[in-house]
Image: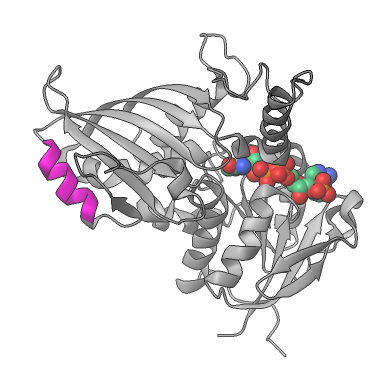
Amino acid sequence: MSGFRVAVAGATGNVGREMLAILAERRFPVSEVIALASTNSIGRDVSFGDKTLKCKALEHFNFKDVDICLMSAGGAVSKEWSPRIGAQGCLVIDNSSTWRMDPDVPLVVPEVNAAAAKGFAKKNIIANPNCSTAQLVVALKPLHDAARIKRVVVSTYQSVSGAGKDGMDELFNQTRAVFVTDAVENKKFTKRIAFNVIPHIDVFMDDGSTKEEWKMVAETKKILDPKIKLTATCVRVPVFIGHSEAVNVEFETPLGADEARAILEKAPGCLVIDRRENGGYITPHEAAGEDATYISRIRDDPTVENAINFWCVSDNLRKGAALNAVQIAEVVVNRGWIKPKAKAA
Ligand SMILES: NC(=O)c1ccc[n+]([C@@H]2O[C@H](COP(=O)([O-])OP(=O)(O)OC[C@H]3O[C@@H](n4cnc5c(N)ncnc54)[C@H](OP(=O)(O)O)[C@@H]3O)[C@@H](O)[C@H]2O)c1
C-alpha cells in the first residue's frame, strides 16, 4: 500500500506528541508526517520515531495534498479549521469536544463502534470521545453485549494532563511551591490541585452537573446505546497521567462478578489485573505509557439486583486521545475507506 500524508495539528502539545510517538510505534503507513502547531512554534523540533520534524504553522498550511489530519489543537482551532481542512479532501480525526455530538460526525472508539467511522463523508470529520468516556466504553461494551446495561454510576479520578501541558505545569509548580513554602498560585484550575482534589471539570450546566459529566452521559449514549442511563461525578486529582474510574453497573439480566471477569479477560482493549491481595490492582502510575484499559476490583454489588462494581484505569493521553485517534485512522485505512491522494515516490 502507498503511504499516507498525515498532518498532526497540535504537535507540540501533550496529545500531539503522543500521536507522533504512536504513529511511529504502530508503523502507520505514512509517506510523510507534517507537524503543525501555532505560529509561536514555527521551526520548533518534535520527535517522530528516530526522526526530528520541524513544526510549521497550521494557519499557513495548505492541506490539499494531505490525506489525514490528526487534530489536537483545542476546540476553538478545531471549530475554525476542521471544516476547512475537510473541504480540501483531508480526513480530520479530531480530539476536541467541538464535533462529537454533530449528527454528521461519527464519534468512534474502534473496540466499540468501528463501523460507525464509515459515516465521515458528509464533513470529512471523525470525532474522538472525551478521555473518560473512551476507557469507560471499552470496558462497558462487552458487558452490555452479554447482559444489556440498564444504568451506570461512575466517579472519575482524572489526571492533570487531561487539562493540557498547562495543567501538568500547575501541579508541578504548586507541589514545588508547597515544599519550599512559596505562595501557591492557581491559574489553570479553580482551586489548588497539589495535595488536593477538585470536584469540578469544565463548566457548570444548569442542572448542577458539569460539562465533563454531561459529556460522559451524552457520548456513552452516542457510542454505545442511547438507552443506557449514566450518572457521573468527575473529579480532578493530583496525578500527572492516567485517569481512574470507580464504576457501578446494573444489568437487565443476571451477570455476576465471575462472569464479568471472564468476559473482560477476553475483551479487545481490556486487560484484567484483579487479585484480591495487597497490590493486586492497577493504579494510574502503572497505566501511564500503556495502551490497555485496565480493569481491577471486580466484585458483586449486593445492594442491587444484577449489579457489579469495578475499577478502571487508562492512560488518558493514549487510549483517551492519541491512541484512539490513530486506531480510527487504522480503521479507515485498513478497511479501504480512504486511499492516498498521491502515490508514494
Ligand atoms: N489531554 C487529554 O487527556 C485529552 C484527551 C482527550 C482530548 N483532548 C483534547 O485534545 C486537544 C489538545 O489537548 P492537549 O492536552 O494536547 O493540549 P496542550 O498540551 O495544551 O497542547 C495544545 C496544542 O495546540 C496547539 N495550538 C494552540 N493554539 C493553536 C493555534 N492557534 N493553531 C495551531 N495550533 C495551536 C499548541 O501549539 P503551541 O505549542 O504552538 O501553542 C499545542 O500543540 C484539546 O482539544 C483537548 O480537549 C485532550
Q: Is residue 278 left or right of residue 334?
A: left
Q: How is the image coloured?
A: one colour
Indicate left or right for 141 with 255 as reference: right
Give the farthest residue toward the left.
254
Determine whether, in the image, residue 237 is placed left or right of residue 125.
left
Q: Is residue 186 above or below residue 310?
A: above
Q: Main secondary structure of the magenta part?
A: helix
Q: Quadrant of residue 30?
A: bottom right
Instruction: Say whether residue 120 is magenta.
Output: no
Res 200 quadrant in image: top right
- Nearer to me, 292 or 62: 292
Q: Position of residue 309 (x, y in %)?
A: 24, 30
Residue 41 location, quadrant? bottom right
> 232 or 178, which is in the foreground?
178
Residue drawn 26% across and 54% down? Answer: 267
Location of residue 197 in the rendering, given as x and y in whole percent from the top left corner: 54, 20
- Residue 15 percent coordinates (x, y): 64, 50
Examine the rendering and report whether any part of residue 287 can be seen: yes
**195 shown above or below 205:** below
Image quarter (top left, top right, bottom left or bottom right) of the N terminus:
bottom right
Residue found at the very far top of the displayed protein: 207
Q: Regarding ligand 1, which quadrant of the image does it lie in?
A: top right
Q: Is residue 267 above or below residue 25?
A: above
Position above or below: 87 against 204: below
Does residue 96 appear anywhere in the picture?
no
Residue 264 in magenta? yes
Residue 72 spot, x, y in % from top left: 68, 49
How many circles with numbers are drawn on the protein? Answer: 0
Q: Quadrant of the C terminus?
A: bottom right
Q: Residue shown at 91%/49% (left/top)?
A: 40
Which residues fall within the magenta stretch?
256-265
Which residue is painted at 31% across and 57% down in the image?
268
